[in-house]
Amino acid sequence: MNLKQTLLANNYSIIASNGYYSLDSGIKPVISKIKDDKDYFSGLEVVDKIVGKASAMLLVYSGVSKVYALVLSLAGKQILDKYNIEYQYDELVPYIINRRGDGMCPMEITVKDIDDLKDAYDALLNKVYE
């Protein structure tokens, strides 16, 4: 079974080629690992249900080598393109929608005007753990 099949079969939100997986939603499964080890995703392939700009920036910051997103935002795609990260997706969307379904995800908003990966990490860390 490949990573995508494993993610879907177990209803994981994210799975990485080193065996890491999580059921947590949002960017917490990514940022919690990077908080403990900046290079946690270095060289790994990651399959994630939803990859927006925030998640893409965190994964690139951590050194990910390949990303597969079930849903990828246009801004997330631009980040992966900018840093030459190999990626695939099932659905490309203009932006990630918040949980209420009435606007943009707060994590996408947090990094909307940020280009630097470290600045994005710092801003997202503050947002998640505020």
Image: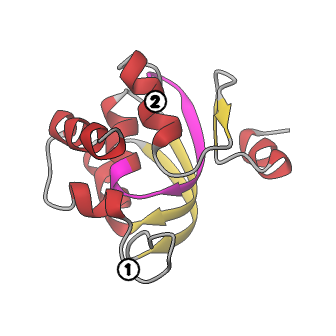
- The residue positioned 72% from the left and 45% from the top of the image is 12
- Residue, disc 2: 32
Residue 32 picture location, percent across and down: 46, 30
Residue under the point 48% across and 41% down: 28
In this orientation, does residue 107 appear?
A: yes
Q: Quadrant of the C terminus?
A: top left
Which of the two residues, 97 or 69, is positioned nearer the viewer here?
Answer: 97
Distance CA(mark 2)–CA(mark 1): 25 Å
Residue 24 lies in quadrant: top right
Residue farthest to the bottom, as pictured = 102
Residue drawn where x is 34% and y is 38% of the image: 129
| Residue 64, percent from left and from top | 44, 31
Check disc 1 and report its element: helix, strand or loop: loop
Q: Is residue 28 left or right of residue 95?
A: right
Q: Which residue is mark 1?
A: 103
Give the residue displayed 33% in from the left and 62% down from the top. Answer: 106
Q: Amino acid at mark 1?
A: Gly
Question: In the orientation shown, which residue stands out farthest toward the front?
Answer: 130
| Label 2 Cα neighbours within 10 Å, binned few <14 / some 14-19 / many ≥20 | some
**Residue 109 spot, x, y in % from top left:** 26, 64
**Sequence-first tag of 2 and 1:** 2
Is 100 placed above or below 25 here?
Answer: below
Q: Is residue 19 left or right of residue 88?
A: right
Q: Quadrant of the N terminus?
A: top right
Magenta-highlighted residues: 42-54
- Pick the residue in front: 65 or 48: 48
Asked whether residue 39 appears in the rendered view, the answer is no
- Amino acid type of the residue that numbered disc 2 sits on in the rendered structure: Ser
| Count of marks, rendered view | 2
